[in-house]
Each structure stands twice: as C-alpha cells, then as structure tokens.
Image: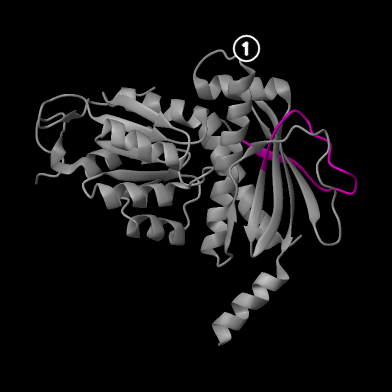
Amino acid sequence: MEQFAPLVRSKDSKPVRYLIVDDSIFARKNIAKMIESFGGEVVGEAGDGCTAITEYERLHPDLVLMDITMPQMEGIEAAERIVRQHPEARVVMVSSVGYQENIVAALQKGARHFVQKPVKADVLYEVVRYVMGEEVLTPAGTAAGAK
Amino acid sequence: MKMELIQPFINSADAVLSEALACETRIADVNMEEETYRRKGVAALIEITGDIEGRIVFDIDPPTATQVAAHLAGGEVEGSDDLVRETACELANMVIGNAITSLNDQGFRFKISPPELHTADHGLSGSEETEALVMCFETDKGSLYMNIAMHYNRRRKEERAATVNA
C-alpha cells in the first residue's frame, strides 16, 4: 500500500487516534491498513451504531470513520447521538450508498464529511487532513487548515 | 425488467470491480432467469425496500472468491473461509450501494439492507411481478455473478405521486 507522510496531532505530536465503525470486518481491516499508512492509530473498532456510541464514550478518539448501512443502529443515527453528546466529535461517514439525500442527512446530523466506497487511500488522507484542520500537523509542520 | 433499473448495476459493477480488483472487467452474459436461481459459490444477499422492492444476490464461484479475497487482503487467505465470505459481502455492498446511489439520484427512493450470506442453494425464481436477471462479469480473477430480482412498488409510487400532487 502507498505510504503517506504521517499526520500527527498538533497538540502533542502523537498519532491521530481513530475509531472505525463498519459491520464488515473486511472493510474495517481495509480502512485500518490505510490509517496505518497515514501514521495513525486505530484505538477501537465497532460493528454497529450502538457499539460505536459505547466505544466513543470509552475511547474519545480524534476521528470516527462510520459506515451508514449497519444492523441494529445505522451510522447516521449513531453519528447524531455521538455529536449531540460531544459537539466536538469529528465523524466522517464512509459508505457505498452516497446519494445526495443520504449525504445531506448525514451532514445535517453532525457528520463532518463523506467518503464513498470503494475507499481510495489518497481521498481518505485528504479528507482526514481537511476534517482535522488545525488539530493535525501536515508533513511540512504547518496545521492542515492554516493558509 | 426496465433498462433504466439495470444500467446502474452494470455501470457500478464495471467501475467498482475495475477499481477494487485493479483489472479490466467485461460483461460476459446477461440472462433472464426462467428457472429457480442456483447459487454458484460464495453469495451475498441484499434486500431492497422502497419505490423498488426485491433482492440482489452477488455470487462468486469459490476459486474466484479466494483469489479476489487474497487480492483485496493483500496476501494469502487459503483456509480463511470467513475472510472470503466477508469479501463477497463487502464487494456486494460496494457494487450494489453505488448502483443504488445512482438510482436514488435519478429520483427513485429506496434503501438497502446490510449484506447477508446467502447459503441456500436456490434463490428466488423470476415471476411476472418479480423479474430476475442474471449478469456474469468476467475479470482477470475469474467470473462474478449478479442475480437481480426486483419490481416497482406500485402502492409506494402512487402514494408519492399523491403527496406531490396534493
């Protein structure tokens, strides 16, 4: 897999901490490999929306990558509940179902961005940089959101 | 079955399989199913509800499924049946999800269920109400099949038309 210049947290220069939420183990493994290539740390995984909420409370990750179509509780509802409790939470929806209505609903419920499957590593990398903004340092040592 | 419903699945399968498997794909065969569907190998089932209802089976013969899983996992997966099954489900999710995205953007409103392993040897047969179409896609890794059986939900369509006209 292509290697990317590592992204680190600007506050302590440690790896960005991720929670991956997807009912497919295969999809989680695939995204985890990409995160490793970004220099990130996967601190937790969840296979449904309910577990995602519990894991967010326990781990307080820097970024949540959340599938939409899942059993028990769908990703958009889980994102809404997480953001309601933690307005600072950064949730990026990652789904193959990317029609406009779905994307708008996710953004209205508090998601910060949307990535369509199949996920391309370079696209995910740029979305992480954009969503993390000044909280992450780019390879040049400047905040991603800085002009 | 209307071409407007089928074309997004063809486009999506072509795009997703080419991207995910990093190879060229081509449609080898398209058939209307007159007899009950017989599973080819590792199959994932996705149900559709909304303006259009039905189900899609994404089916890969076992040697191809193992090759595809190994390619996507970046290594050998011999003996890891779970990973092979997971691969079939996720590939189905991506192909069908992208097609559903296209149809929703055209104005059809429906949702899909999470993919489930289809373990029965036979699927639904086609009928006047639910036509079934089988498409075979050839790739460098082998052949993959999609069996699509869906129909317009007339009641839902009428309800939406009534809402729009009200």
> Which region shows up in magenta?
B25-45
Instruction: Specify whether residue A125 is in view.
Output: no
> Three-letter amino acid code at disc 1?
Glu
Residue for badge 1: B78
Residue at the (70%, 20%) spot, across then down: B63
Q: Is residue A7 above or below residue A123?
A: above
Q: Most extreme residue toward the bottom, as rendered?
A: B166
Q: Is residue A21 left or right of residue B108?
A: left
Residue at the (64%, 19%) spot, across then down: B81
Q: Is residue B136 left or right of residue A5?
A: right
Q: Is residue A92 left or right of residue B98?
A: left
Where residue B56 appears, x then y in whole percent? 70, 46
Q: Is residue B119 left or right of residue A30?
A: right
Residue B42 location, quadrant: top right
Residue at the (55%, 22%) spot, across then down: B71
Q: Quadrant of the C terminus of chain B?
A: bottom right
Q: Quadrant of the N terminus of chain B?
A: bottom right
Where residue B39 appears, x then y in whole percent? 79, 34
Q: Chain of mark 1?
A: B
Does the magenta portion include B41? Answer: yes
How crowded pointer 1 is (Cα within 10 Å; few <14, some 14-19, many 20+) is rated as few
Residue B91 versus residue A109: which sits nearer the camera?
A109
Instruction: Specify whether residue B165 is in view.
Output: yes
Residue B117 versus residue B16: which sits nearer the camera?
B117
Residue B141 location, quadrant: top right
